[in-house]
Protein backbone atom coordinates (compact mmCIF):
# COMPACT_ATOMS: atom_id res chain seq x y z
CA UNK A 1 0.00 0.00 0.00
CA UNK A 2 2.83 2.35 0.94
CA UNK A 3 4.44 1.51 -2.38
CA UNK A 4 1.41 2.38 -4.48
CA UNK A 5 1.11 5.67 -2.62
CA UNK A 6 4.77 6.44 -3.25
CA UNK A 7 4.54 5.59 -6.97
CA UNK A 8 1.42 7.78 -7.42
CA UNK A 9 3.06 10.65 -5.54
CA UNK A 10 6.20 10.26 -7.66
CA UNK A 11 4.22 10.39 -10.90
CA UNK A 12 2.43 13.59 -9.84
CA UNK A 13 5.58 15.33 -8.62
CA UNK A 14 7.64 14.30 -11.67
CA UNK A 15 4.87 15.49 -14.02
CA UNK A 16 4.77 18.82 -12.18
CA UNK A 17 8.56 19.03 -12.41
CA UNK A 18 8.87 18.39 -16.15
CA UNK A 19 5.82 20.40 -17.24
CA UNK A 20 6.00 23.35 -14.88
CA UNK A 21 9.21 23.81 -12.88
CA UNK A 22 11.60 22.81 -15.67
CA UNK A 23 10.06 25.48 -17.88
CA UNK A 24 10.48 28.36 -15.44
CA UNK A 25 12.67 31.12 -16.83
CA UNK A 26 14.15 33.15 -13.98
CA UNK A 27 16.53 35.42 -15.87
CA UNK A 28 18.87 32.53 -16.52
CA UNK A 29 19.36 31.88 -12.81
CA UNK A 30 18.49 28.22 -13.17
CA UNK A 31 15.23 26.57 -12.21
CA UNK A 32 13.87 24.82 -9.09
CA UNK A 33 14.16 21.04 -8.89
CA UNK A 34 11.27 20.23 -6.61
CA UNK A 35 11.32 16.49 -7.32
CA UNK A 36 14.13 16.24 -4.74
CA UNK A 37 11.27 16.00 -2.22
CA UNK A 38 10.81 12.36 -3.30
CA UNK A 39 14.35 11.48 -2.23
CA UNK A 40 14.37 13.68 0.88
CA UNK A 41 11.28 12.09 2.42
CA UNK A 42 12.03 8.39 1.87
CA UNK A 43 11.68 6.31 5.07
CA UNK A 44 14.93 5.73 6.91
CA UNK A 45 14.32 1.98 7.38
CA UNK A 46 14.52 1.41 3.64
CA UNK A 47 17.48 -0.84 2.71
CA UNK A 48 20.20 1.35 1.30
CA UNK A 49 20.41 -0.46 -2.03
CA UNK A 50 16.66 0.09 -2.57
CA UNK A 51 17.09 3.78 -1.84
CA UNK A 52 19.98 4.05 -4.30
CA UNK A 53 17.96 2.28 -7.01
CA UNK A 54 14.95 4.57 -6.39
CA UNK A 55 17.27 7.57 -6.70
CA UNK A 56 18.72 6.32 -9.98
CA UNK A 57 15.26 5.58 -11.41
CA UNK A 58 13.87 9.00 -10.54
CA UNK A 59 16.98 10.55 -12.08
CA UNK A 60 16.64 8.60 -15.33
CA UNK A 61 12.97 9.62 -15.73
CA UNK A 62 13.81 13.30 -15.25
CA UNK A 63 16.79 12.97 -17.62
CA UNK A 64 14.75 11.48 -20.45
CA UNK A 65 12.25 14.34 -20.26
CA UNK A 66 15.00 16.97 -20.10
CA UNK A 67 17.46 15.70 -22.73
CA UNK A 68 20.12 15.67 -20.05
CA UNK A 69 20.83 11.96 -19.97
CA UNK A 70 23.02 10.92 -17.06
CA UNK A 71 23.03 14.29 -15.27
CA UNK A 72 20.09 13.76 -12.90
CA UNK A 73 20.83 10.04 -12.68
CA UNK A 74 24.35 10.65 -11.38
CA UNK A 75 23.15 13.35 -9.00
CA UNK A 76 20.17 11.46 -7.57
CA UNK A 77 22.24 8.31 -7.10
CA UNK A 78 24.82 10.31 -5.16
CA UNK A 79 22.14 12.06 -3.08
CA UNK A 80 20.44 8.80 -2.13
CA UNK A 81 23.80 7.31 -1.24
CA UNK A 82 24.72 10.22 1.01
CA UNK A 83 21.31 10.80 2.65
CA UNK A 84 21.36 7.92 5.20
CA UNK A 85 24.86 8.90 6.29
CA UNK A 86 23.79 12.51 6.72
CA UNK A 87 20.65 11.51 8.63
CA UNK A 88 22.69 9.35 11.00
CA UNK A 89 24.84 12.36 11.83
CA UNK A 90 21.93 14.77 12.12
CA UNK A 91 19.64 12.65 14.33
CA UNK A 92 20.62 11.34 17.72
CA UNK A 93 18.30 8.33 18.04
CA UNK A 94 17.76 6.97 14.56
CA UNK A 95 16.07 3.78 15.77
CA UNK A 96 13.13 5.71 17.23
CA UNK A 97 12.00 7.12 13.88
CA UNK A 98 9.35 5.29 11.90
CA UNK A 99 8.06 5.90 8.40
CA UNK A 100 8.60 8.90 6.21
CA UNK A 101 11.18 11.55 7.01
CA UNK A 102 9.61 14.96 7.65
CA UNK A 103 9.80 17.81 10.13
CA UNK A 104 7.41 16.11 12.57
CA UNK A 105 9.24 12.79 12.64
CA UNK A 106 12.78 14.14 13.02
CA UNK A 107 12.26 17.69 14.28
CA UNK A 108 12.04 20.91 12.34
CA UNK A 109 15.64 22.10 12.79
CA UNK A 110 17.10 18.75 11.75
CA UNK A 111 14.82 18.49 8.75
CA UNK A 112 15.70 21.98 7.53
CA UNK A 113 19.40 21.27 8.03
CA UNK A 114 19.26 18.07 5.97
CA UNK A 115 17.08 19.65 3.28
CA UNK A 116 19.41 22.63 2.87
CA UNK A 117 22.58 20.52 2.64
CA UNK A 118 21.12 17.97 0.22
CA UNK A 119 19.41 20.59 -1.97
CA UNK A 120 22.55 22.70 -2.31
CA UNK A 121 24.65 19.63 -3.12
CA UNK A 122 22.05 18.33 -5.57
CA UNK A 123 21.60 21.62 -7.43
CA UNK A 124 25.32 22.31 -7.66
CA UNK A 125 25.99 18.84 -9.04
CA UNK A 126 23.16 19.09 -11.59
CA UNK A 127 24.22 22.50 -12.91
CA UNK A 128 27.89 21.49 -13.07
CA UNK A 129 27.23 18.21 -14.86
CA UNK A 130 24.78 19.94 -17.20
CA UNK A 131 27.39 22.53 -18.19
CA UNK A 132 30.12 19.85 -18.18
CA UNK A 133 32.75 22.51 -17.53
CA UNK A 134 33.80 24.84 -14.73
CA UNK A 135 34.47 27.72 -17.09
CA UNK A 136 31.39 29.64 -15.91
CA UNK A 137 31.89 28.65 -12.26
CA UNK A 138 30.46 31.91 -10.92
CA UNK A 139 27.29 31.31 -12.96
CA UNK A 140 27.08 27.75 -11.56
CA UNK A 141 27.30 29.02 -7.99
CA UNK A 142 24.74 31.77 -8.56
CA UNK A 143 22.38 29.33 -10.26
CA UNK A 144 22.83 26.86 -7.39
CA UNK A 145 22.07 29.41 -4.68
CA UNK A 146 19.17 31.02 -6.51
CA UNK A 147 17.47 27.79 -7.57
CA UNK A 148 18.06 26.18 -4.17
CA UNK A 149 16.27 29.05 -2.43
CA UNK A 150 13.19 28.58 -4.61
CA UNK A 151 13.31 24.78 -4.29
CA UNK A 152 13.66 25.01 -0.51
CA UNK A 153 10.74 27.43 -0.20
CA UNK A 154 8.54 24.95 -2.05
CA UNK A 155 9.92 21.85 -0.27
CA UNK A 156 9.62 23.34 3.24
CA UNK A 157 6.25 24.89 2.41
CA UNK A 158 4.97 21.49 1.34
CA UNK A 159 6.35 19.98 4.55
CA UNK A 160 4.56 22.55 6.71
CA UNK A 161 1.23 22.22 4.91
CA UNK A 162 1.15 18.47 5.16
CA UNK B 1 36.58 -16.48 -3.77
CA UNK B 2 34.96 -16.47 -0.34
CA UNK B 3 36.83 -13.34 0.56
CA UNK B 4 35.59 -11.71 -2.61
CA UNK B 5 31.99 -12.70 -1.84
CA UNK B 6 32.36 -11.43 1.70
CA UNK B 7 33.71 -8.19 0.37
CA UNK B 8 30.86 -7.80 -2.13
CA UNK B 9 28.21 -8.55 0.50
CA UNK B 10 29.76 -6.16 2.92
CA UNK B 11 30.08 -3.29 0.50
CA UNK B 12 27.09 -4.06 -1.73
CA UNK B 13 25.58 -0.59 -1.30
CA UNK B 14 28.79 1.11 -2.26
CA UNK B 15 29.13 -1.26 -5.21
CA UNK B 16 25.63 -0.48 -6.54
CA UNK B 17 26.33 3.21 -6.05
CA UNK B 18 29.63 3.00 -7.95
CA UNK B 19 28.18 0.99 -10.83
CA UNK B 20 25.26 3.42 -11.27
CA UNK B 21 27.56 6.45 -11.12
CA UNK B 22 29.90 4.95 -13.72
CA UNK B 23 26.95 4.23 -16.02
CA UNK B 24 25.65 7.78 -15.56
CA UNK B 25 29.02 9.37 -16.29
CA UNK B 26 29.53 7.22 -19.39
CA UNK B 27 26.10 8.38 -20.59
CA UNK B 28 26.95 12.04 -19.93
CA UNK B 29 30.31 11.64 -21.65
CA UNK B 30 28.65 10.16 -24.70
CA UNK B 31 26.11 12.97 -25.00
CA UNK B 32 28.91 15.46 -25.10
CA UNK B 33 30.38 13.79 -28.14
CA UNK B 34 27.00 14.20 -29.87
CA UNK B 35 26.82 10.44 -30.20
CA UNK B 36 23.56 10.20 -28.34
CA UNK B 37 20.92 7.70 -29.27
CA UNK B 38 17.46 9.15 -29.51
CA UNK B 39 16.13 6.55 -27.10
CA UNK B 40 17.33 8.59 -24.15
CA UNK B 41 16.17 11.99 -25.38
CA UNK B 42 12.86 13.76 -25.76
CA UNK B 43 12.86 12.58 -29.38
CA UNK B 44 12.00 9.11 -28.11
CA UNK B 45 8.51 8.04 -28.94
CA UNK B 46 6.84 8.11 -25.51
CA UNK B 47 8.16 11.47 -24.34
CA UNK B 48 7.83 13.07 -27.77
CA UNK B 49 4.30 11.71 -28.05
CA UNK B 50 3.27 13.28 -24.75
CA UNK B 51 5.01 16.52 -25.70
CA UNK B 52 3.13 16.43 -28.97
CA UNK B 53 -0.16 16.14 -27.09
CA UNK B 54 0.82 19.02 -24.80
CA UNK B 55 1.78 21.12 -27.82
CA UNK B 56 -1.53 20.47 -29.57
CA UNK B 57 -3.50 21.54 -26.48
CA UNK B 58 -1.59 24.78 -26.09
CA UNK B 59 -1.80 25.24 -29.84
CA UNK B 60 -5.58 25.21 -29.64
CA UNK B 61 -5.49 27.83 -26.93
CA UNK B 62 -3.41 30.20 -29.04
CA UNK B 63 -5.08 29.84 -32.45
CA UNK B 64 -5.41 33.57 -32.90
CA UNK B 65 -1.73 34.35 -32.47
CA UNK B 66 -0.87 31.38 -34.66
CA UNK B 67 -3.02 32.76 -37.43
CA UNK B 68 -1.26 36.09 -37.26
CA UNK B 69 2.11 34.34 -37.30
CA UNK B 70 1.08 32.31 -40.33
CA UNK B 71 -0.09 35.39 -42.20
CA UNK B 72 3.24 37.01 -41.46
CA UNK B 73 5.14 33.93 -42.55
CA UNK B 74 3.10 33.74 -45.75
CA UNK B 75 4.10 37.26 -46.62
CA UNK B 76 7.74 36.45 -46.02
CA UNK B 77 7.48 33.35 -48.18
CA UNK B 78 5.93 35.37 -50.98
CA UNK B 79 8.88 37.71 -50.96
CA UNK B 80 11.18 34.71 -50.91
CA UNK B 81 9.50 33.38 -54.04
CA UNK B 82 10.07 36.70 -55.73
CA UNK B 83 13.70 36.67 -54.76
CA UNK B 84 14.09 33.14 -56.05
CA UNK B 85 12.54 34.05 -59.37
CA UNK B 86 15.05 36.85 -59.70
CA UNK B 87 17.87 34.52 -58.76
CA UNK B 88 16.88 31.79 -61.14
CA UNK B 89 17.71 33.69 -64.29
CA UNK B 90 21.37 34.43 -63.66
CA UNK B 91 21.82 30.91 -62.30
CA UNK B 92 20.48 29.46 -65.52
CA UNK B 93 22.76 31.69 -67.47
CA UNK B 94 25.80 30.47 -65.61
CA UNK B 95 24.64 26.87 -65.99
CA UNK B 96 26.49 26.16 -62.77
CA UNK B 97 25.20 23.42 -60.53
CA UNK B 98 27.59 24.10 -57.70
CA UNK B 99 26.80 27.71 -57.08
CA UNK B 100 25.55 28.23 -53.52
CA UNK B 101 22.30 29.82 -54.43
CA UNK B 102 18.93 29.48 -52.78
CA UNK B 103 18.07 26.95 -55.45
CA UNK B 104 20.35 24.37 -53.89
CA UNK B 105 18.23 24.26 -50.73
CA UNK B 106 15.13 22.28 -49.96
CA UNK B 107 12.91 23.39 -47.06
CA UNK B 108 10.98 20.96 -44.85
CA UNK B 109 8.48 22.66 -42.54
CA UNK B 110 8.24 21.27 -39.00
CA UNK B 111 6.52 22.07 -35.75
CA UNK B 112 8.34 22.60 -32.45
CA UNK B 113 6.83 20.26 -29.87
CA UNK B 114 9.21 20.86 -26.99
CA UNK B 115 11.86 23.45 -26.15
CA UNK B 116 13.99 24.39 -23.16
CA UNK B 117 15.57 27.80 -22.68
CA UNK B 118 16.72 27.79 -19.06
CA UNK B 119 19.62 25.33 -19.14
CA UNK B 120 23.17 25.66 -20.41
CA UNK B 121 22.50 22.85 -22.87
CA UNK B 122 19.12 23.61 -24.36
CA UNK B 123 17.38 21.50 -26.96
CA UNK B 124 14.27 21.65 -29.05
CA UNK B 125 12.31 18.72 -30.41
CA UNK B 126 10.57 18.93 -33.79
CA UNK B 127 7.90 16.67 -35.23
CA UNK B 128 9.80 15.57 -38.35
CA UNK B 129 12.33 12.75 -38.43
CA UNK B 130 14.19 10.31 -40.64
CA UNK B 131 10.86 9.34 -42.24
CA UNK B 132 10.62 12.88 -43.64
CA UNK B 133 14.21 12.94 -44.85
CA UNK B 134 15.69 14.78 -41.88
CA UNK B 135 19.35 13.96 -41.26
CA UNK B 136 21.90 14.84 -38.62
CA UNK B 137 23.72 18.19 -39.09
CA UNK B 138 20.99 19.83 -41.14
CA UNK B 139 20.33 23.52 -40.52
CA UNK B 140 17.09 24.75 -38.94
CA UNK B 141 15.63 28.23 -39.49
CA UNK B 142 12.37 30.00 -38.67
CA UNK B 143 10.53 32.83 -40.38
CA UNK B 144 12.57 35.27 -38.27
CA UNK B 145 16.04 33.83 -38.60
CA UNK B 146 18.48 31.09 -37.78
CA UNK B 147 17.44 28.55 -35.12
CA UNK B 148 20.02 25.76 -34.86
CA UNK B 149 21.38 22.46 -36.13
CA UNK B 150 19.83 18.96 -36.03
CA UNK B 151 21.79 16.81 -33.59
CA UNK B 152 19.99 13.48 -33.63
CA UNK B 153 17.11 11.95 -35.53
CA UNK B 154 14.45 9.38 -34.64
CA UNK B 155 11.87 8.01 -37.04
CA UNK B 156 9.23 10.69 -36.41
CA UNK B 157 11.06 13.26 -34.33
CA UNK B 158 14.37 15.07 -34.36
CA UNK B 159 16.40 16.86 -31.72
CA UNK B 160 17.82 20.29 -32.58
CA UNK B 161 20.68 22.13 -30.85
CA UNK B 162 19.72 25.84 -30.85
CA UNK B 163 22.05 28.85 -30.83
CA UNK B 164 21.43 29.04 -27.07
CA UNK B 165 23.56 25.99 -26.26
CA UNK B 166 27.01 26.61 -24.78
CA UNK B 167 28.72 24.04 -27.05
CA UNK B 168 27.54 25.39 -30.40
CA UNK B 169 29.19 28.05 -32.54
CA UNK B 170 27.80 29.19 -35.90
CA UNK B 171 29.96 30.84 -38.53
CA UNK B 172 28.51 34.30 -39.01
CA UNK B 173 29.20 37.55 -40.81
CA UNK B 174 28.62 41.24 -40.16
CA UNK B 175 26.35 42.15 -43.04
CA UNK B 176 27.65 45.69 -43.59
CA UNK B 177 31.39 44.94 -43.88
CA UNK B 178 31.50 41.20 -44.51
CA UNK B 179 33.71 40.34 -41.51
CA UNK B 180 33.54 36.72 -40.33
CA UNK B 181 33.03 35.74 -36.70
CA UNK B 182 31.35 33.05 -34.64
CA UNK B 183 28.44 32.99 -32.24
CA UNK B 184 28.92 31.82 -28.67
CA UNK B 185 26.24 31.68 -25.98
CA UNK B 186 27.05 32.75 -22.42
CA UNK B 187 24.64 30.26 -20.86
CA UNK B 188 22.32 32.76 -19.23
CA UNK B 189 20.20 35.08 -21.36
CA UNK B 190 18.19 33.26 -24.03
CA UNK B 191 17.70 36.43 -26.11
CA UNK B 192 21.36 37.24 -26.80
CA UNK B 193 24.56 35.56 -27.97
CA UNK B 194 28.13 36.86 -28.18
CA UNK B 195 29.94 37.44 -31.45
CA UNK B 196 33.55 36.26 -31.22
CA UNK B 197 36.76 36.74 -33.22
CA UNK B 198 36.12 40.19 -34.66
CA UNK B 199 39.58 41.84 -34.62
CA UNK B 200 40.04 45.22 -32.98
CA UNK B 201 40.89 47.13 -36.16
CA UNK B 202 37.44 46.38 -37.59
CA UNK B 203 34.60 48.70 -36.75
CA UNK B 204 31.47 47.17 -35.21
CA UNK B 205 28.46 49.41 -34.71
CA UNK B 206 25.37 49.01 -32.59
CA UNK B 207 22.54 48.08 -34.93
CA UNK B 208 24.67 46.09 -37.41
CA UNK B 209 22.90 42.99 -38.68
CA UNK B 210 24.62 39.63 -38.16
CA UNK B 211 23.86 36.94 -40.74
CA UNK B 212 25.06 33.40 -41.45
CA UNK B 213 28.33 33.38 -43.38
CA UNK B 214 27.58 30.70 -45.95
CA UNK B 215 31.03 29.20 -45.39
CA UNK B 216 29.63 25.93 -44.07
CA UNK B 217 27.29 23.65 -46.03
CA UNK B 218 24.72 23.79 -43.21
CA UNK B 219 23.24 27.25 -43.85
CA UNK B 220 23.01 29.40 -46.98
CA UNK B 221 24.49 32.87 -46.85
CA UNK B 222 22.48 35.71 -45.37
CA UNK B 223 20.12 34.00 -42.91
CA UNK B 224 19.63 36.64 -40.19
CA UNK B 225 21.00 35.74 -36.75
CA UNK B 226 20.62 38.98 -34.82
CA UNK B 227 21.40 42.65 -34.39
CA UNK B 228 24.38 44.07 -32.48
CA UNK B 229 23.08 45.34 -29.15
CA UNK B 230 26.28 46.38 -27.39
CA UNK B 231 29.94 46.29 -28.29
CA UNK B 232 33.00 47.02 -26.19
CA UNK B 233 36.71 46.97 -26.88
CA UNK B 234 38.96 46.22 -23.92
CA UNK B 235 42.44 47.76 -23.98
CA UNK B 236 44.12 44.41 -23.47
CA UNK B 237 41.99 42.38 -25.86
CA UNK B 238 42.62 41.66 -29.53
CA UNK B 239 38.94 41.15 -30.20
CA UNK B 240 35.72 43.06 -29.80
CA UNK B 241 33.29 41.87 -27.13
CA UNK B 242 30.00 42.04 -28.98
CA UNK B 243 26.54 41.22 -27.72
CA UNK B 244 24.00 40.27 -30.37
CA UNK B 245 20.24 40.37 -29.84
CA UNK B 246 18.82 37.25 -31.48
CA UNK B 247 16.17 37.48 -34.20
CA UNK B 248 14.61 34.23 -33.02
CA UNK B 249 12.53 34.35 -29.85
CA UNK B 250 12.97 30.82 -28.55
CA UNK B 251 10.22 31.13 -25.95
CA UNK B 252 7.55 31.66 -28.61
CA UNK B 253 9.04 29.53 -31.38
CA UNK B 254 6.41 27.26 -32.96
CA UNK B 255 7.19 26.58 -36.60
CA UNK B 256 10.60 26.00 -38.16
CA UNK B 257 12.01 24.88 -41.48
CA UNK B 258 14.72 22.27 -41.84
CA UNK B 259 17.22 22.99 -44.60
CA UNK B 260 18.43 20.25 -46.85
CA UNK B 261 21.49 21.19 -48.89
CA UNK B 262 21.39 19.35 -52.19
CA UNK B 263 25.06 20.16 -52.78
CA UNK B 264 26.28 18.91 -49.42
CA UNK B 265 27.66 15.71 -50.92
CA UNK B 266 29.85 17.67 -53.33
CA UNK B 267 31.01 19.86 -50.47
CA UNK B 268 31.86 16.89 -48.28
CA UNK B 269 33.69 15.20 -51.13
CA UNK B 270 35.90 18.22 -51.57
CA UNK B 271 36.53 18.63 -47.85
CA UNK B 272 36.90 15.07 -46.67
CA UNK B 273 37.99 13.38 -49.91
CA UNK B 274 36.22 10.80 -52.00
CA UNK B 275 35.62 7.42 -50.45
Image (tube, helix red, strand yellow):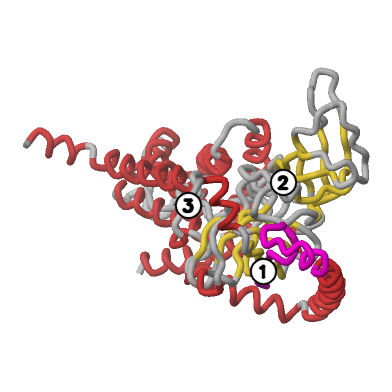
Mark 1 — residue?
Answer: B106
**Region in magenta:** B88-112
Q: Are marks 2 and 1 on the same chain?
A: no
Q: Quadrant of residue A162?
A: bottom right
| Up/down of B250 relative to B2, above or below | below
- Secondary element type, mark 2: loop
Distance CA(mark 2)–CA(mark 3): 21 Å
Q: Nearer the viewer, mark 2 or mark 3?
A: 3
Instruction: Tell me the chain of label 2.
Output: A
- The verdict on residue A36 being magenta is no
Could you confirm whether marks 1 and 3 are on the same chain? Answer: no
Q: Quadrant of residue B112?
A: bottom right
Q: Is residue B227 left or right of residue A116?
A: right
Residue A126 in view (yes/no): yes
Q: Residues within 10 Å of mark 3 (few under 14, many from 20)?
A: many
B125, B20: nearer the viewer: B125
Res A113 seen here: no
Question: In front here: B196 or B223?
Answer: B223
Q: Characterize the local packing of mark 1: few (<14), some (14-19) or many (20 or more) Cα atoms within 10 angstroms.
A: few
Of A70 and B224, which appears nearest the observer? B224
Give the residue pinned by disc 3: A69
Image location (x, y in percent) of residue B10 = 19, 37
Camera-nearest label, 2 or 1:
1
Q: Position of residue B129 (x, y in %)?
A: 54, 69
Residue in view at x 66 percent, y 40 percent: A143
Amino acid sequence: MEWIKFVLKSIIIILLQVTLFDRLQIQGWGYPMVYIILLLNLPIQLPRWVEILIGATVGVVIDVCNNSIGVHMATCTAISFVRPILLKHAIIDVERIKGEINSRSIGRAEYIKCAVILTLAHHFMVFTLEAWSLQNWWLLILQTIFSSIITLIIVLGYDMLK
Amino acid sequence: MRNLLDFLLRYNNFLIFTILEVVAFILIGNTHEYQQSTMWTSANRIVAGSNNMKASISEYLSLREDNLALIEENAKLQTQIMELKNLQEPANERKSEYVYSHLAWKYTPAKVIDISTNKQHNYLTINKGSRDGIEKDMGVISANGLVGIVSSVAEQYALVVPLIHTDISISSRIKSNGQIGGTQWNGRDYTTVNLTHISRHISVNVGDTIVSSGLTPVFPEGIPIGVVEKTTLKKTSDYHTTKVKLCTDYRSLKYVQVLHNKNKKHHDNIYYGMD
